[in-house]
Amino acid sequence: MRLGFSVRQALRTAFCAVILLSSGSVAAQQQKNDAEAHKPRQSVQTRQKFMLDKSVFVTSDFEHRNTAADFAKWLRTQGVAASNAYNKARNRITFVKVNAIEGAAGNDAWQISVKTRRITVAFTSGNALRHAVGILKGRVVREASGDRYIPGGIATDWGARTTSRDHDAMTDAAGSLRSVGDLETVVKRLGGRSKEVYLILVSTDHWRMESPSLEIAGSAARLYPTDGYYTIRQLQQVAAAAKRSHVEIIPTLELLSENRAFTAAFGHSVFSVEGMRLVRAAIEDCIDALHPSKICLGSMSPQADMRYMEFISDLASMLGVELVIIES
């Protein structure tokens, strides 16, 4: 899944820009697009329908009462008799915070369970809740007769999964520059043990991945090591060799800790607003070059606060890739 604008356009767009959608029809279409853009990893459909032709009571715990109020307000804009004040409506939508969700292997997990009379939205974080609300809004179906409903079933998703640093299919291509032939041989050998190979292209000290967008924004001489880096064509050659061996390359860019090469080139921390704009461009460059289904951003660090992690998780969802974090 690609974004509808180029990496270079992204570089010219402020990270914190907010687009206010005043038109109800435009907003509804955007919600539908968001739901289609990020399909849940696990989804089981049933023949049940949660009809929206009767009163709906929307509820949540006290901490997330605003979510219930906002969702009820949104339903009313869709012509549904909805309220977050206690009533006897049999049709209910409940938002509930949980510690974990069975079957969800990563952080920011959510699950939407839709039955005939009840919808339960379970979530483990605020970020997961926002994703779930967007998905639920996008699931409303309008029939030719004018009837509206939400299809029955259970959908589960999460923002990231974890892997171990001592994973036997992880290879360091950042510490020193290696030949394409060497990388192809290593990937093929590791592929005998695992169908996923984590290829470290960016470490906290070395930026070995060609990043055209970053070259436009700063000093390539400071970004790349003096002994060289891997061009996009070289990386694509390694990825093609891996594919022939039925191995999936998971590009690994260590961007959850301060990156010395990045800071030297741009004068910004990866955790700053300007830094996050550039991190986004670098990740887009990587995805455009290799088209991976997963991307690993290294190990967690104290510097990667909730604001940064929500940015990373949202970006991964927007770009249609699975985010992997290395366990410390």
Image: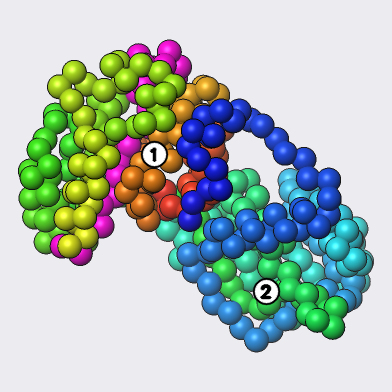
Q: Is residue 263 above or below residue 101?
A: above
Q: Name the residue under label 2.
A: 114
Q: Is residue 312 above or below residue 89?
A: above
Most distant residue in the bottom direction: 47
The spot of residue 279 in percent (x, y) is 44, 31
Quarter containing the C terminus: top left
Q: Looking at the image, which is closer to me, 137 or 182?
A: 182
Residue drawn at point x = 40 percent, y = 34 percent: 282
Task: Give the amino acid at mark 2.
Answer: Val
Q: Mark 1 points at which residue?
A: 285
Residue drawn at point x = 20 percent, y = 64 percent: 246
Which segment is the magenta one? 245-269
Q: Looking at the image, which is closer to me, 7 or 245?
A: 7
Q: In which quarter of the image is residue 270?
A: top left
- Asked if residue 42 lies left or right of residue 34, the reply is left
Q: Does the magenta stretch include residue 205?
A: no
Task: Give the amino acid at mark 1.
Answer: Asp
Q: What element carries label 2?
A: strand
The spot of residue 94 in percent (x, y) is 74, 63
- Asked if residue 141 lies left or right of residue 257, the reply is right
Q: Is residue 256 magenta?
A: yes
**Residue 12 in sight here:** yes
Q: Distance between the residues labelled 2 and 1?
A: 38 Å
Dot 2 crowding, Cα within 10 Å, few <14, some 14–19, many 20+: many
Q: Looking at the image, which is closer to me, 109 or 145?
A: 145
Residue drawn at point x = 14 percent, y = 29 percent: 176
Q: Is mark 1 on a helix, strand or loop?
A: helix
- Asked if residue 153 lies left or right of residue 29, the reply is left
